[in-house]
Image (cartoon, rainbow, N blue to C red):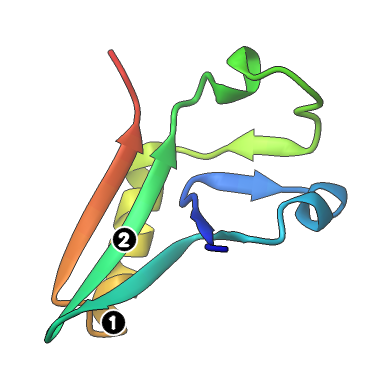
Amino acid sequence: NFDYIVSNLELEAAQKEKFKKLVDSKIYNVGNIKVGVLALLTLETTKTTAGDMSGIKILNYVEQIIKYSKVLQEIKADIVLLVSHIGT
């Protein structure tokens, strides 16, 4: 039972009900270190995933990295970890 971290996803209201465990970022306490985590989906996710992807928008990587890195630093993360599903 855990949250799913996705920092570059925008959901319409109907989709938010389906994905209640999604969070934009999260801080984990590892010993005395606060590790801030953000995660990205590839822009192609809505094209390569089976099922209803209506009401789901994948946001710009760079903008979201900057936004959530700042958020995590403001709430005193000692380190920020980026988990990414972006290929070349």
Q: Residue at x 81, y 26 (%)?
A: 52
Disc 1 marks which residue?
A: 74
SS at mark 2?
Answer: strand
Q: Residue at x 52, y 19 (%)?
A: 44
As displayed, is residue 41 above or below residue 74? above
Could you say which is closer to the camera, residue 71 or residue 34?
A: 34
Q: Residue furthest right?
A: 14
SS at mark 1?
Answer: helix
As displayed, is residue 76 above or below residue 59? below
Could you say which is closer to the camera, residue 35 or residue 46?
A: 35
Question: Residue 79 at x, y = what percent?
Answer: 14, 68
Question: Residue 27 at x, y = what percent?
Answer: 33, 74
Q: Residue at x 31, y 84 (%)?
A: 75
Discs 2/1, front:
2
Amino acid type at image mark 1:
Glu
Disc 2 marks which residue?
A: 37
